[in-house]
Image: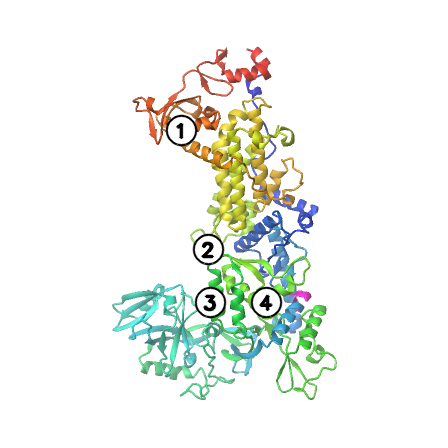
Amino acid sequence: MEMKETLNLLKTKFPMRANLPNKEPERQQEWKEQDIYGQRQELNKDKPSFILHDGPPYANGNIHIGHALNKISKDIIVRYKSMSGFRSPYVPGWDTHGLPIEQALTNTGVDRKSMSVAEFRKLCEDYAWKQINKQRDDFKRLGVAGEWDNPYVTLTKDYEAEQIRVFGKMAEKGYIYRGLKPIYWSPSSESALAEAEIEYHDVRSPNIYVAFNVNDGKSVLDNDTSFVIWTTTPWTLPANLAIAVKPDATYGVYKADGRKFVVAAELADKVAETLEWNEVKLVKEIPGKDLEGITASHPFYDRDSLLILGDHVTLEDGTGLVHTAPGHGEDDYIVCQNYDLPVLSPVDGKGLFTDEAPGLEGIFYDKANKTITEWLDENNALLKLDFFTHSYPHDWRTKKPVIFRATPQWFASIKDFRQDILEAVEEVDWLQPWGMQRIYNMVRDRGDWVISRQRAWGVPLPIFYGENGEPIITPELTEHVAELFAEHGSNVWFEREAKDLLPEGFEHPSSPNGQFEKETDIMDVWFDSGSSHHAVLRQRDNLEFPADMYLEGSDQYRGWFNSSLTTSVAINGVPPYKSVLSQGMVLDGAGKKMSKSIGNVIDPNKVIKQMGADLIRLWVSSVDTQADVRVSMDILKQVSEVYRKIRNTIRFLIQNTEDFDFNKDGIAYEDLRPVDQYLMNKLNLTVEHVIDGYERYNFSDIFKEINHFLTLDVSNFYANFAKDILYIDAPEAYDRRAMQTVFYHIVRDLTKLLTPILPHTAEEIWSYLEEEESYVQLAEFPEVKEYDNSKELLDQWSRFMSLRDNVLKANEVARENKIIGKDFEAKTTIYASQSVKNLLDSLNSDIRQILIASEINIKDLEEKPEDERILDFENVSILVERMQGDVCTRCRITTEDSIKLSEDEYLCQRCHDICEEHYPEVLNNN
């Protein structure tokens, strides 16, 4: 028998390399076959519920890294709740209607004009399902658990029927009305046009810069200052009511050519060059948001233009100040709704100016450009005029240009129940502190909601018209349409005439001859997804209303959070969610927005093929999603290093418990040594802090806590000195079994804690444990324990760890001075104050072994000699020398009382005793 055979050098089949890209799909297939999600739901069926309602992503293309952040975050929460005493089913959803799918089909060569609306809609539906199936596979590959075979989809018959019922309830309360909104209008055919009826041709247009003089600068600007706007449609200036600025941009006041002008600071050089300004001087800079409420004088009419904030304002072209005419532009209209500005559209159906544009009455809009620029020049407001050629929308029938013109649209009145919404906002737990104020201000300041869209692919507005044009919306009619949609789907609206959609024998005073028309507009897609609380939460037996949580990106305060809140308060009087958690956007490693043209896009599917889904999941847990988060391949490589450390540390723990049966060999807490109890308490604190992180939905704290515990408490401390026991002591030695007990607790509890974040890796680890549950996903989270001696023990060992830090520093200095190489070559003398000596006595532990030295001597601080090698610390001084003697062949410590076995083989007394009792043959060999 050789000496190395007396060491407990255990082997494990747990691989060092995870091989996640290949192993994860196999594990997911196993979960599917075993119905792990279904088993978890069955285990939780009688527990209280926690419902996280999924905000539906749009069904178009493969998922991007923002999708991954969103879905993984939801999955982490649902998995945690499911393992922590809650019934937490997850029903994924998809948003499927709207322009992007219409455009996608057009881009594939579909000729929209060669088919009926119903036929085109069928192609849209087929396309949407293909996108859903593509994204569903992507989400499942991320390890997200849920009802993937039974998602909610906004195009299904049952969903559309319930959406109609939401509309009906709002109409019944008087919240639905008809008003004005700008849409594409063709003067040449005197009709409104849908998106599909637009084609683009090049036109030559004027390109002008106009000065609007400040009228009331609100103590922010002097009244001798002018705002500079840029427009290619001078004919819309008679309808100007506002100037929009970008709230988060910086604007500068510049002195040039004897005047003062305001433009976006980022565009100032470009504007100065274009306008040929000389001797430009920056007077001051102003945040865009501070310009709100200032008024400027209209350049040729006796009225004011209001400075307003607009998220649509960009700094790509122009001046950063956008001429805003709510009667002639969709962005203009939407932003002006927030300021209760009227919809002024002084152009009639033939494209001629009305008497709302004094001086231009009867002039065709395009011919008015010349007159308007002359007026501007006369008023010293025209800063530059030239012409350029660009692509412009045209009527596909007449091939003539179209305009944006305000026409009647359908609205949901916000003002009628605004106060109810504001009160509902205050009932919700907004988990981002600023979230409540953000949505509160949006609701407070927003205009009425335009719910009609002039498109084909969507849920039609269930409105009929009498012979006199009167809209007919009754509860009976709406329910009849809902029942039709539930049976046939919403395409029936476009397949049948109005009379065939009405109940048999329907009569109405507005149609004495029994003739009816139907609305051809569809609903805003935000009404689709905003109805999910009714169409999903209230209709599915395993879900509940209101949801416990909505979780989406911070852009959804304006989107899904808002539309859901509006419809729910309208029909239920309460918000659809108890709490809302928002997340920042995903940027590249430099903090820039991701763009295919820049080449900084991170494709999660490519990352999965290279690194595995668990790596993306670990990245999600590592970032602080309260703000925008960053990702790049370099960042993911850093995360993979953390994953490798976690995996290798746990592998070490598994490897060194291969000969350990917890049920047979495990030692009770009260019988463990003090140092083992210390680690059990550190583990308990980690469990407590990690659970707190899950409860606060702060994944980055969990990431840091687990990483900190494994790195500092386990790897750098406990596992480091454990080798001297695990490898050296006899297999059944008490100290060894004590440490293996702690190792097992650590692996078991951390595996559970990691399951919501790293389910694939956690299940792999779990397969090496002897636990009752076949899968860790079916286990419960560890509970925080109460140890009687916890406070005293943690205090003692915390002070010892400070002393250990000093010893390690002394070892490092000795290493630099070539006194020692490895720590166990050290002979360490600690000159300690009485309080330190008392501490070491109270630990009742093998300090030499824990400090990994060959010899430790404790002496009074007063006995410290004059020796430049001694390092002084608070209450202690430390001398590190090289231990003299022979190196034990078995445990590698140096000792002066070694037992010589041969010329080059020695044993310390401890190893000799172990061998004598358990491996006598190795001594006999010598």
Viewer-proximal residue among 159 and 536: 536
Q: Are marks 4 and 3 in contact (CB under 8 Å)?
A: no
The overriding secondary structure of the stretch rendered in magenta is helix
Q: Residue 105 location, x and y as percent? A: 60, 66
Q: CA distance from mark 4 to mark 2?
A: 29 Å
Res 102 seen here: no
Question: Upstream in the sequence, badge 3 or badge 1?
Answer: 3
Task: Give the CA separation, mark 4 to mark 3.
Answer: 18 Å
Q: Nearer the viewer, residue 48 or 649?
A: 48
Residue highlighted by disc 4 = 568
Query: Callout 3: few (<14), some (14-19), or many (20+) C-alpha neighbours within 10 Å?
Result: few
Which residue is labeled 2 in the image? 628
> Does 232 sit left or right of 166 as displayed?
left
Going by the numbered disc 4, the residue's amino acid type is Ser
Location of residue 279 (image quadrant): bottom left
Residue that numbered label 1 is attached to: 836
- Residue 872 % position (x, y): 33, 29
Circle number at residue 819: none
Q: CA distance from mark 3 to mark 1?
A: 60 Å
Q: Which residues lie in the magenta part?
A: 155-160
Between the residue at mark 1 and the residue at mark 2, the CA separation in whole angstroms equals: 48 Å
> Residue 867 at what x, y percent from top left?
30, 22
Amino acid at the residue labelled 1 = Val
The numbered mark, 1 or 2, whose residue comes first in the sequence reads 2
The answer to the question of whether label 1 and label 2 lie on touching residues, with beta carbons closer than 8 A, is no
Judge depth for marks 2 and 3 and give the one in front: 3
Label 2 vs 3, first from the N-terminus = 3
